[in-house]
Image (spheres, grey):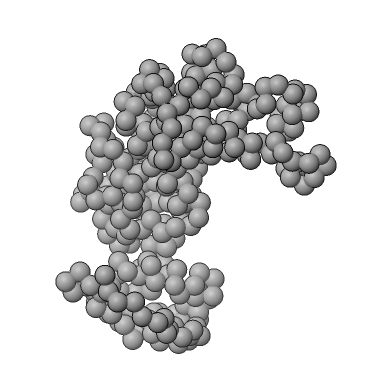
């Protein structure tokens, strides 16, 4: 590990930042537009997209851009990335609604209880999951302890307010209400920590997947949803949490956003077979003026492999 040192970089104004980019070999055709871009997006955020257009020596940045690289290339990558994140968010929302519905419906019927999640025997605990923690999350997400008339109480979903105002037992709303307020990350953990393979297979079979594959892909969905919602860069970035490989999909060893596009497409095909999401993604990807390999798309540069 390299020795740590004191951070000494000084802030620079927009003109200084423009000169800095030009000194590294980046072509800027319109400096007034570049200044507006730096104001609205920020130099640091843009610089992440610029990494793909820099020169490297022995895997290390040389401090120079590739010959012919322009600010327009970086801006194009930025806008494609933003559009792709929005498409991913919209798709994951549809998948999340379907998956939580499947989990709640199947387990409610199987265990003949709208409150199956209260039964600790249905879960196995781990370092990352406690049944008591799930119940605390439900209390927090439903605003159970909100004071009457408080702002927190007013933010409750109408159906949650109705449940707590009408019933005093069971302590929690039924699972189909809880489904509406827990995140995809929470449902991913619920599925992962179900104690029996029977329950897991009951759910995963609805999506034509093996339980280990569904477990992995739900985890990936939670990650890519959060990354997209928090405006994280997907372009030219190797991502964590590679999806479990499955013969149904051309998941690649290098974990770029293409792998996540694959699993999202698969889920959508299961829940909305007539969807046009992949066409929309393809249209956005085709706006990219640089190489599609920065998204991990196979060398022929299309999504026709799906």
**Compared to 218, does 162 lie above or below?**
above
Residue at coordinates 47% horizontally, 22% vertically from top-left?
A: 122
- Viewer-closest of 30 and 88: 88
- Residue 300 is situated, as x and y percent measured from the top left of the image, at 21, 49
Residue that lies at the very extreme toward the right in this rendered image: 149
- Viewer-closest of 140 and 33: 140
Q: Identify the image quadrant of the C terminus.
A: top left
**Compared to 139, does 14 lie above or below?**
below
- Residue 56 is situated, as x and y percent measured from the top left of the image, at 22, 72
Residue at coordinates 28% horizontally, 80% vertically from top-left?
A: 63
| Residue 172 can be seen in this image | yes
- Residue 187 is situated, as x and y percent measured from the top left of the image, at 49, 34
**Compared to 150, does 203 lie above or below?**
above
- In-image side of 169 versus 295 (left or right): right
- Viewer-closest of 72 and 63: 63
The quarter of the picture where residue 126 lies is top left
The quarter of the picture where residue 7 lies is bottom left
Residue at coordinates 30% horizontally, 45% vertically from top-left?
A: 242
Q: Identify the image quadrant of the N terminus.
A: bottom left
């Amino acid at each position: 590990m390299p020795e740590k040192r004191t951070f000494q970089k000084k802030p620079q104004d927009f003109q200084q930042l423009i000169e800095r980019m030009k000194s590294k070999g980046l072509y800027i055709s319109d400096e007034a537009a570049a200044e507006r871009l730096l104001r609205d997006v920020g130099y640091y955020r843009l610089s992440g997209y610029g990494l793909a257009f820099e020169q490297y020596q022995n895997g290390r940045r040389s401090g120079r851009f590739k010959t012919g690289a322009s600010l327009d290339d970086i801006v194009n990558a930025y806008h494609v990335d933003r559009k792709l994140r929005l498409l991913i968010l919209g798709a994951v929302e549809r998948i999340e609604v379907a998956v939580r519905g499947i989990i709640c419906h199947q387990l409610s019927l199987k265990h003949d209880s709208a409150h199956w999640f209260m039964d600790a025997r249905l879960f196995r605990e781990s370092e990352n999951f406690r049944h008591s923690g799930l119940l605390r999350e439900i209390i927090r997400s439903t605003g159970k302890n909100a004071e009457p008339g408080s702002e927190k109480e007013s933010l409750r979903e109408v159906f949650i307010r109705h449940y707590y105002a009408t019933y005093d037992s069971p302590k929690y709303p039924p699972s189909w209400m809880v489904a509406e307020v827990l995140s995809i990350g929470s449902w991913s953990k619920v599925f992962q920590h179900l104690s029996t393979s029977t329950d897991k297979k009951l759910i995963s079979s609805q999506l034509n997947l093996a339980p280990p594959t569904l477990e992995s892909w739900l985890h990936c969905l939670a990650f890519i949803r959060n990354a997209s919602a928090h405006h994280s860069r997907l372009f030219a970035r190797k991502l964590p949490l590679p999806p479990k490989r499955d013969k149904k999909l051309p998941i690649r060893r290098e974990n770029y956003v293409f792998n996540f596009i694959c699993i999202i497409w698969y889920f959508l095909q299961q829940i909305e077979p007539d969807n046009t999401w992949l066409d929309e993604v393809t249209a956005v990807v085709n706006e990219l003026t640089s190489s599609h390999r920065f998204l991990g798309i196979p060398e022929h540069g299309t999504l026709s492999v799906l």
